Image (spheres, grey):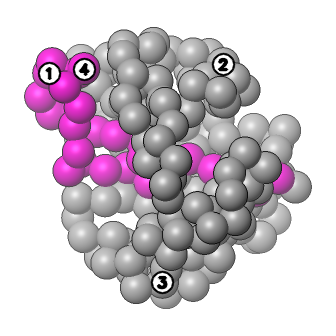
Amino acid sequence: MQQDQAHITIRKAKAEDVNLLSELAALTFRGTYAQFNTKENMDAYIQDHFTVDIMLKEILDTKFQYFLAYYDEEIAGYCLLDTNRTTPQLQIENTIEISRIYVAEKFKGKKIGKLLMDTCINYAVENMHTAIWLGVWQENKNAIAFYQHCGFEIIGTTEFVLGDDVQHDFIMKKQII
């Protein structure tokens, strides 16, 4: 699956992308949340989720779909779809989660997030999922507004544990079928 807009290309991640993806994942996660969390909690989360070994297993596992966004051939963002998880708030089957969707700071405002979101929604449609969902920190007002603009609605809440800090997320859903 590939999309182009101006200088933007989105493609499925491959095993050989894992080092770059791991670096981008840690960079964008820190850039988004470091100011709100302790260094220890950030380091622990990154070590538990964004190492090369962990991300390579996910890339090779068919339950996960990583897509990479490039701007002028420089990696600019990524998203991760997960068919393995669900949440009780959905009350339907055959859903897919947008587990992560991030754009590097220097590429924000270039519509890369929207193209990544379109890629996620198109993947859900093509694979006949009934709904697409995600969790978003309740304090991340910009992300919430973006997801609402993309047709997602808040359907509940959940807890997100970052190191020793329990945070509160909204569960948001977009009906596909």
| Label placed on residue 92 | 1
> Does dot 4 land on a helix, a strand or a loop?
loop
> Does dot 1 land on a helix, a strand or a loop?
loop
Check disc 4 and report the residue beneath it: 89
Check whether the beta carbons of the residues at disc 4 and disc 2 lie within 8 A of each other. no
Check disc 2 and report the residue beneath it: 145
Range covered by the magenta-colored residues: 80-105
User: Could you tell me which residue is drawn at 68 percent across and 51 percent down?
Assistant: 37
Q: CA distance from mark 2 to mark 3?
A: 32 Å
User: Could you tell me which residue is drawn at 76 percent across and 70 percent down?
Assistant: 73
Check whether the beta carbons of the residues at disc 2 and disc 3 lie within 8 A of each other. no
| Label placed on residue 150 | none
Mark sitting earlier along the chain (3/4): 3
User: Could you tell me which residue is drawn at 33 percent across and 70 percent down?
Assistant: 58
Check whether the beta carbons of the residues at disc 3 and disc 4 lie within 8 A of each other. no
Q: Residues within 10 Å of mark 3 (few under 14, many from 20)?
A: some
Q: Is residue 85 left or right of residue 51?
A: left
Q: Is residue 129 left or right of residue 53?
A: left
Q: Amino acid at mark 4?
A: Gln
Q: CA distance from mark 3 to mark 4?
A: 32 Å
Q: Quadrant of the N terminus?
A: bottom left
In-front residue for pair 49/2: 49
Residue 144 in the image, given as x and y percentages of width and height: 61, 23
> Does dot 2 land on a helix, a strand or a loop?
helix
Q: CA distance from mark 4 to mark 2?
A: 20 Å
Check disc 3 and report the residue beneath it: 52
Q: Quadrant of the C terminus?
A: top left
Residue 27 in the image, given as x and y percentages of width and height: 71, 66
Q: Amino acid at mark 2?
A: Ala
Residue 137 in the image, given as x and y percentages of width and height: 56, 33
